[in-house]
Amino acid sequence: GAKIRRRNRRNPQYLDRGADVKFSDVAGLGNIRVELEEIVKFFTMAEVYQRRGVRVPSGILLCGPPGVGKTLLAKAVAGEAGVNFFSISASQFVEIYAGVGASRVRSLYEEARENAPSVVFIDELDAVGRKRGLVKGSGGQERDATLNQLLVCLDGFVSRGQVITIAATNRPDILDEALVRPGRFDRKIYIPKPSFTGRIEILKVHARKKPMADDVDYPVIANLTDGMVGAELANIIEIAALNMMRDGRSEITTDDLLQATQTEERGILERKRRSPEIWKQLALNEAAMAVAAANFPDLCSVEFITIAARAGKDLGYVRAKVNHMKFSEGMLRYFFTLAIFFFFFISNSDLLFSFMHTLGSQKNLLDYITVQIAPRAADEIWNGESQLSTIWAKPADNARSAARRLVLSGLCGKLNGIHNSWVEDNVNEIDLEALKILNNCYSRVKEILNRNRGLLEATVDQLVEKKNLSKQEFSDLVRKFGTLEPVPLDL
Ligand code: ADP
């Protein structure tokens, strides 16, 4: 035992000797950066804090979805402060054998203390820090022992200010209260998915060491990657670099990045032999969706259309950027009258809020349903009711669940749909109401498609020929052939 321990001391098991990460390697953070700079000061100005009697937090919680850069940030804090970085994933604490988890926590902190100042990084904290009692059976007991050990270790260093623990989780809400008590993980920093400008910055950070062409269009890629996180964006740059190598070129172009975005999102390109009819069928499916979407600029803008086959994905796809809610003046007035009404008669701010929230999106939801049902309508218009395929099954399903949501939120049909008992008693009625909404949207989209036959046919032809259509190419077609007039919906 003693021998092993001595070896461990010279050769710490949990020390990360990886690349020296700095804040400049982490992009798209906005204001969060200021909070992290403060953590660095806990180390670099430890004495000043101590002299003035300011307690330095022993734990900081980074909350956010996977891949947004929580680990990278923790490393950057250590890198900027010039201290050692120890890391472990809490899922490694959760062992079947009794006592293993707790002893791992102990040796992790022993190492960190021997090599102080240091940052201890615990990934997936929720694996061990779940509220006690949520896990039943002996596995639960073992986990409690680990959690208790962690609490002891966190408390042990409060006065020293030499070891700071940074933990990451996507579920701060399920953490045991004991963990988030003052003096432990009492500071939470939320790291959201990157915004449009954040995505541009992240792409540029990863492009720094790559031979990028001078005219690479980062905003185009940022528009196509709405909802993606830093890890995916970093991957896109790597895939694009491989693309360049494969073609024997020396610069990464916008087109490499476009292809890489598709690869990241939908898998690698496959050369498929398909009959002209099948290509046309696929193209009609996507073109219908895009043409319908072009009629609702408030809802979204079409960024990319493709029918190219990718690994495991046979169908095509339209990438649209969802726009933020916009209120017209008339809607705003209506909305305030209702808000005041509810304020006086219900005075329940929660209900008021949820109502306001759904009210704003009612129009958006109806437009969304109309767009999602478009492929089904196009199939009927072009191939006839008796020749229907099932290619549109997925979007039709989206439309169906959105219609149900509308009924259940009380915004369409019966307004008292917000009561649970009413929902249970009226399942059939809800379906009927939803069906009514679907039928209305269906006639509306048929009208839109019939009016835009020229645009639809041109889009299908171009798609069959090129397999991909950029935002620019599609909007050129819309300008040339489109008849975009709002089709009213009567509900
Ligand atoms: P998390 O810990 O939140 O799951 P990681 O820190 O492990 O995410 O991110 C994985 C990789 O993705 C990083 O090593 C980095 O290459 C890239 N990455 C993620 N977020 C960012 C960011 N904000 N800026 C730059 N690169 C990022």
Image (cartoon, rainbow, N blue to C red):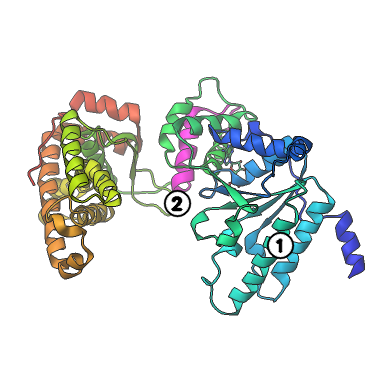
- Tell me, yes or no, whether the highlighted magenta stretch contains residue 382: no
The tag earlier along the polypeptide, 1 or 2, is 1
- Say few, some or many: other residues with alpha carbon within 10 Å of mark 2 (under 14 / 14 to 19 / 20 or more): few
Please give left or right for residue 232 compared with residue 54 in the image.
left
Q: Is 484 situated above or below 76?
A: above
> Judging from the image, what secondary structure is the residue with disc 2 in?
loop
Query: In this view of the protein, which residue sits in the foreground, 5 or 458?
Result: 5
Tell me the mark number nearer the camera, choosing from 1 and 2.
Answer: 1
Residue under numbered circle 1: 152
Find residue 416 and report its image quarter.
Answer: bottom left
The answer as to whether callout 1 falls within 8 Å of ligand 1 is no
Q: Can residue 42 be seen here?
A: yes
Image spot of residue 356 (x, y percent): 25, 44
Going by the image, does 201 lie left or right of 437?
Answer: right
Report which residue position mark 2 lands on: 311
| Residue name at image x 50 percent, y 32 percent | 198
**In the image, 454: left or right of 70?**
left
Element under label 1?
A: helix
Residue 250 belongs to the span the image colors magenta:
yes
Q: Which residues are magenta?
A: 247-269
* Rendered residue at 23%/28% (across/down): 478
Residue 250, position in %: x, y?
61, 27
**300 is higher (above) or lower (below) than 99:** above
What residue occupies the far bottom of the structure in this picture?
137
> On the rendered image, what quadrant is the N terminus found in?
bottom right
Amino acid on which the number 1 mark rests in the picture: Val
Amino acid type, residue under disc 2 in the picture? Ala
Point 25% across, 39% down: residue? 287
Residue 21 appears in the rendering: no
Q: Position of residue 414 (x, y in %)?
A: 12, 56
Give coordinates of residue 140: x percent, y percent.
Answer: 59, 74
Report the image quarter containing ligand 1: top right
